[in-house]
Image: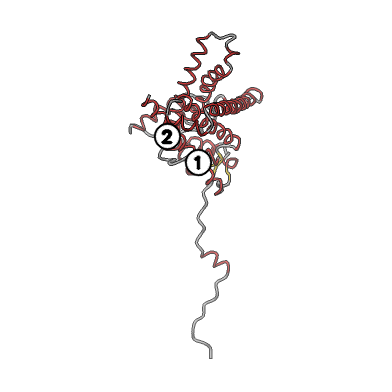
Amino acid sequence: MPDPTPTTAAPTPEATIATQPAAPEQPRYFLRFTLGQRCLHAVLFTTFLVLAATGLMMRFSGSIWAIRFAKLVDGFGTILFFHKFCALVLTLAFIIHVREIVARGIFKRDKSIFWGPTSMVANWKDVKDLFGHMRWFLGLGPKPRFERYAYWEKFDYWAVFWGMVVIGFSGYAMWFAPFFARFLPGWALNAALVIHSEEGLLAILFIFSIHFVNTHLRPDSFPMDMVIFTGRESEEEFKNRRPDEYQRMIAEGKSATRITDAPPLWLLNFSRVVGFTAIVIGLALLVLTLSAYIAG
């Protein structure tokens, strides 16, 4: 006698796969900075931190914190040595960067370096973005739509050139004073000392306040913007921060050339350690600078 209990056919493998919930779609990542650009930035901020720390100790050599640190490293002579060493490294990195610009812009005739949406040279759109940003801060208009580089990023970039010319030249004039004294009057060397000291302090105050706030402490990147360390940013970040560049990339059909893997965990952790260390050191130097000014 047949069994009256109804039987259910075993599900096929295809049916089992079809009934499983779909895996969440992984976010796409786009390459923003190459390895060479990230290495150049690493050299820049590392040498600047050392130059700022050692320069402040010599500028405020009478402060208790400067005297105590000098005792730990066997005197101000050691501090001056590291100051000069980092100055040489930073100068070499700057020369390499300028050489690359000249090679691309003049010999390879890459005009995108000097104008266009990917250029670091300021244009009329940056002026409009600046005033549009001010109106947005006051709630008087929409937020500007930025391209590959925003106006404040271009200002930061060219500030390095200004610093290398003014601070760098005055520093080398003091370092090699006998050589420069052959064609410069004595008052010029005295002026170099004042210019080097005051411009160095301005650079420290700017980097550790304005640059840190714009780059790391603004709401959409707090507590730290990781892209300069990993070189990658998610598609959502890309669209929100630089919508004009994102749309231009899609319109030109170049999105596939920018897609890259997600940053590995070790790189994220390493970037967090390096980034937070730099921020803490920078903020500490900013506090020491302001306290030395107040006390002096």
Q: Which badge, 1 or 2, is on the more N-terminal residue?
A: 2
The residue under label 1 is which amino acid type? Met
* Disc 1 element: loop
Percent from the top left, x then y, of residue 113?
A: 58, 26
- The residue sitting at the right extreme is 107
Question: Which quarter of the figure has residue 183?
Answer: top right
* Disc 2 element: helix
Which residue is pictured at 56% across the width and 9% down the height? Answer: 184
Question: Which quarter of the figure has residue 109?
Answer: top right
Q: How crowded is mark 1: few (under 14 residues within 10 Å), some or many (20 or more)?
A: many
The residue under label 2 is which amino acid type? Val
Which residue is pictured at 55% across the width and 65% down the height? Answer: 17
Alpha carbon of mark 1 to alpha carbon of mark 2: how far? 14 Å
- The residue sitting at the left extreme is 139
Which label number is shown at residue 68?
Answer: none
Colouring method of the image: secondary structure
Question: Which quarter of the figure has residue 259?
Answer: top right
Q: Which of 226 and 149 is in front in this view?
A: 226
Percent from the top left, x then y, of residue 103?
A: 65, 25
Residue that numbered label 1 is attached to? 226
Q: Which of 43 and 243 is in front in this view?
A: 43
Percent from the top left, x then y, of residue 158?
A: 51, 25
Which residue is pictured at 55% across the width and 33% down the height? Answer: 41
Q: How crowded is mark 2: few (under 14 residues within 10 Å), some or many (20 or more)?
A: some
Q: Which of 228 and 244 is in front in this view?
A: 228
Residue that numbered label 2 is attached to? 213
Left or right of 5: which side holds 143?
left
144 over 196 or under it: above or below: below
Q: Nearer the viewer, residue 62 or 15?
A: 62
- The residue sitting at the bottom extreme is 1
